[in-house]
Amino acid sequence: MGQGRGWEGAVLRLLRAKDFVCTVTDAEDVTPHYRRLRLDDGGLLAAAGVHPTMWVRLWFSAGGRPHQRAYTLVDPDPAAGTFGLEFALHEGAASDWARSARPGDTVEATVQGTGFQHPDPAPSHLVAIGDPASLPAINSLLGALDSAPATLWFEGDLDGLPCRADAEHHDIRQIPRRDAGAHLVERVRAELPAVLDGVPDPYVWIACDTATTRALASYVRRELGVPKQRVHALGYWRAD
């Protein structure tokens, strides 16, 4: 396993990444554009442990070449040796595989690079900014930091999606995607200062497309002055 993955696979092997073969046990179309799979972990959770927002690299074939993408584990169960994956479907090798995946199908997974540190001190307010691609990680984050009030800016439509934010306890703001993410940036810049006003220990978590994530992270750190250790920003996909 792990052969024929090109330079990416070679680098991961040098970093002592761990490889596993996972088997699909169940598949469900949550919406026409969002698909959930359940998998047997092939020993992954017992070997790697579990933490909030944990992700793995999955390997696919695209035009005969190896192609890897990172996905957050959903409801990992170390005792049962199972976890879920959720796919916001679009064009690409990962989505193509997810659309056709059926019980018994397998996929190779690599564990390397994932991690999570609970903010210290604990957040007095959580800010999460994401979209369908990062929804599983947002759900995991909300579960890990459930004692903090939270404001969620979500780029897209949550209708029918498995969002675990609770409108009774969380401030959920849905923003349509326009102008390659610029509309989301504009809304956050207009609204976030009031949310953070008087908050002593905020924690800001950003996971949108790469360009939008970069713009928002720069704004939060440089213009709002949130310390870098209180900001987590990771681009989850690249816009065309």
Image (spheres, helix red, strand yellow):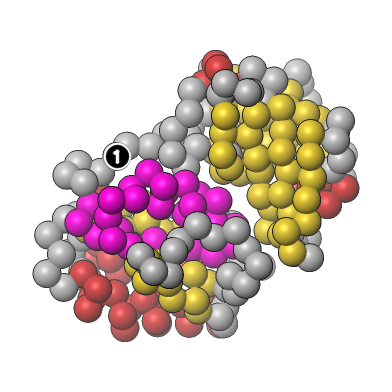
Circle 1: is it few (<14), some (14-19), or many (20+) Cα within 10 Å? few
Residue extending farthest front: 168
Q: Quadrant of residue 13?
A: top right
Confirm whether the magenta stretch covers residue 85.
no
Note whether 66 is above or below 190 in the view shown.
above
**Residue 221 point in image, percent of width and height:** 25, 62
Quarter holding the N terminus is top right
> Viewed as shown, does residue 178 lie left or right of 3?
left
Of 198 and 212, the residue lying toward us: 198
Report helix, strand or loop for mark 1. Answer: loop
**Residue 160 point in image, percent of width and height:** 65, 67
Q: Is residue 213 visible?
A: no
At a point 16% along the width and 73% down the height, the residue shown is 197
**Residue 129 point in image, percent of width and height:** 42, 64
At a point 55% along the width and 16% down the height, the residue shown is 47
Confirm whether the magenta stretch covers residue 131.
yes
> Viewed as shown, does residue 199 lie left or right of 139?
left
Note whether 23 is above or below 13 in the view shown.
below
Q: Quadrant of residue 215?
A: bottom left
Look at label 1 and name its amino acid. His
**Number of numbered discs:** 1
At a point 31% along the width and 80% down the height, the residue shown is 191
Q: Give the labeled residue for mark 1.
A: 118
Residue stretch rendered in magenta on the structure: 123-150
Q: Quadrant of residue 39?
A: top right
Of 126 and 168, the residue lying toward us: 168
